[in-house]
Amino acid sequence: MKNASSTKEPPPLSISTDKVCYVIVKAREFDVKAAVTDPGDSSNASDDAMVSVLEDHGDDPVGYELRAAISAMNEDEQIDLVALAWLGRGDGSIDEWDELRSEATRAHNQRTASYLLGIPLLADYLEEGLSQFGRSCEDFEMGHL
């Protein structure tokens, strides 16, 4: 006999898979950034084996792109993104999606992008949350990487 939850359709998402995948790809780019090792360095990046592109500078374009993309989302999309991160982190199960989403709704504010960028392993959590909905970024990544 099959488990009832395995045959049940996942709840609907207010955010498209492509938008979540874009955030995942950008979050992975953002996460690889290391602490700035020489903030006063004025040498040419090519002289330093391009190490500076992997450093987390305050004016990092990847951070700007990610913040702008999240800020441009409507409130429901932002709420789903937060709830997906929580789901992927293990704060609840797919069967508890309504509760996770309700909590994300209560916690929603104008700092969603900053909050999400402060979560270590954000890309992994979003990817895991998305997989619990039976969705994947495989096709998205093939077309964008």
Image (cartoon, helix red, strand yellow):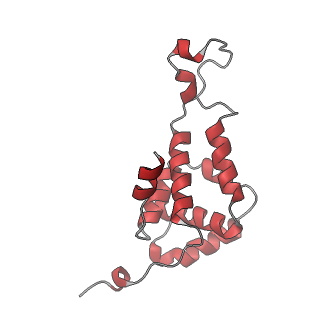
Residue ranking furthest to the right: 110
Residue at left offset 52%, top offset 41%: 29
Q: Is residue 21 above or below residue 15?
A: above
Q: Position of residue 112 (x, y in %)?
A: 68, 57
Out of 3 and 17, give the one closest to the viewer: 17
**Residue 28 picture location, percent across and down:** 50, 44
**As drawn, is 135 to the left or to the right of 16?**
left
Taking the spot 68% from the left edge, 15% from the top edge, the residue there is: 40
The quadrant of the picture occupied by the N terminus is bottom left
User: Which residue is drawn at the image coordinates 42% and 68% (left, top)?
Assistant: 132
Residue at x 50% of width, y 36% of height: 32
Quadrant position of residue 83: bottom right
> In the rendered view of the protein, which quadrant contains the C terminus?
top left
Find residue 80 and report its horizontal and vertical position in percent: 59, 67
Is 143 on the left or on the right of 42, as rendered? left
Q: x%, y% of residue 23?
A: 56, 53
